[in-house]
Amino acid sequence: MKLAYIITAYASAVQLERLINTLDKPYHTFVIHIDKRQEQVFEDTKKVFAGRDNVHLMEDRYKIWWGRMNFTHSILSAMSYLVDNQIDYDYALLISEVDYPVKPIDQIEQFFEDNHGKNFIDYALNDSKDHIWADWDPPASTKSRMEHWHLMFNTRLLLRIPMKRK
């Protein structure tokens, strides 16, 4: 089972090394996005993983703030990296540097073998009526979050601005 790990990181090359060494198999790939504000972590990580062919550091980096679109852009960029570089994988997994497996890697691989072909990402269309969030009132509703501007502080909503996004 070929797994591609998309890892978002910001704090520690040592933590990344521990995580990747735990998950590593010759047929696994690691694509790492390090917050652009963390230049020292990026440089340290380059040194730690120099010469490891299955570990890829994203050069196209974003400044990341939790809950903002920059995080989504970093993930999409990493997914594009996998496709653009024709990296062969069966499943792509999104994790952060602070995630650590609670099961042995062989059990993780077996889970994906047993569920081959299944998708584990949940999504809903803008006007979906049968999604878990469909009945939530603004500002929590998906539609509201997509259509209106929100003023946030420390990931808490201060104000839903009655202006539509384009």
Image (cartoon, rainbow, N blue to C red):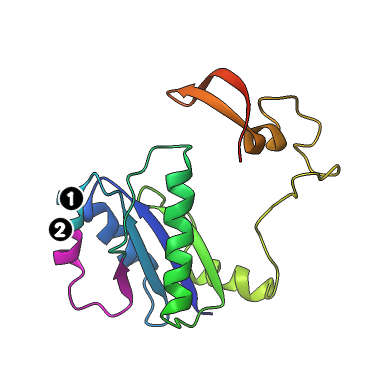
The residue positioned 39% from the left and 67% from the top of the image is 23
Rounded to the nearest angstrom, the CA distance separating label 1 from label 2 is 6 Å
Disc 2 target residue: 43
Residue 161, given in percent of the width and then of the height, sits at 59, 21
Secondary element type, mark 1: helix
Type of amino acid at the residue the image marks with label 2 = Glu
- The residue sitting at 69% across, 71% down in the picture is 115
Residue nearest the observer in this picture, 130 or 19: 130
Left or right relative to 123: residue 56: left
Q: Which of 128 and 102 is in front in this view?
A: 128
Give the vertical position of 21 relative to 123 (above or below): below
Q: Which of 95 and 1 is in front in this view?
A: 95
User: Label 2's element?
Assistant: helix
- Whether the residues at callouts 1 and 2 have beta carbons within 8 Å, the answer is yes
Left or right: residue 14 compared with residue 100: left
Question: Crowding near pointer 1: few (<14 within 10 Å), some, many (20+)?
Answer: few
Is 119 covered by the magenta stretch?
A: no
Q: Mark 1 points at which residue?
A: 39
* Residue 100 picture location, percent across and down: 41, 53
Residue 53 highlighted magenta (yes or no): yes
Q: What stretch is highlighted in magenta?
A: 44-57
Give amino acid for label 1: Glu
Q: Residue at x 36, y 43 (%)?
A: 64
Quadrant including the N terminus: bottom right
The answer to whether one can see residue 108 in this image is yes
